[in-house]
Image (cartoon, helix red, strand yellow):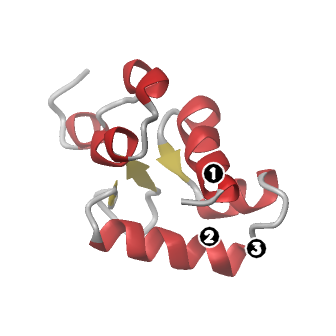
Amino acid sequence: MDDRCRSAVRYAVEKQGGLFRIRAVSDAIEGLSYRRVEALSYVWEVRGWLIPGPSRADSKAVTSVLLERYGFDDLLDKLVDWELVWYGYVR
């Protein structure tokens, strides 16, 4: 994973609560176009590194699998488990 992709993950967790909002990430990270971030989100979802929201209107969310695989140990405690929130297990 290159530095821009790592910055995208860090931004999503630190600034967006773990939500991988394509427009916000592409605007925040220099050198990552909207199309590149969109392509990354698709590939990362297929790999299980992002999870989809309950509807197409919802953002995807970063998973602990992605953080653990690429050594983002400092971000693990900041990650919200969005599946629990989206599907009503957390109030």
Q: Which mark is residue 8?
A: 1
Kind of element beneath mark 1: helix
SS class of the residue under badge 2?
A: helix
Q: Position of residue 35 (x, y in %)?
A: 67, 81
Give the labeled residue for mark 2: 37
3D distance between C-alphas at marks 3 and 1: 11 Å
Could you give the CA–CA distance between mark 2 and mark 3, rounded to whole angstroms?
Answer: 6 Å
Specify the quadrant of the image occupied by residue 30: bottom right
**Nearer to me, 40 or 69:** 69
Q: Are marks 2 and 3 in contact (CB under 8 Å)?
A: yes
Quadrant in which residue 77 is drawn: top left
Residue shown at 76% from the left, 73% from the top: 33
Q: Is residue 35 above or below residue 81?
A: below
Instruction: Indicate the quadrant containing the C terminus: top left, top right, bottom left or bottom right.
Output: top left
Amino acid type at image mark 1: Ala
Label 3 sits on residue: 33
Image check: 88 left or right of 38? left
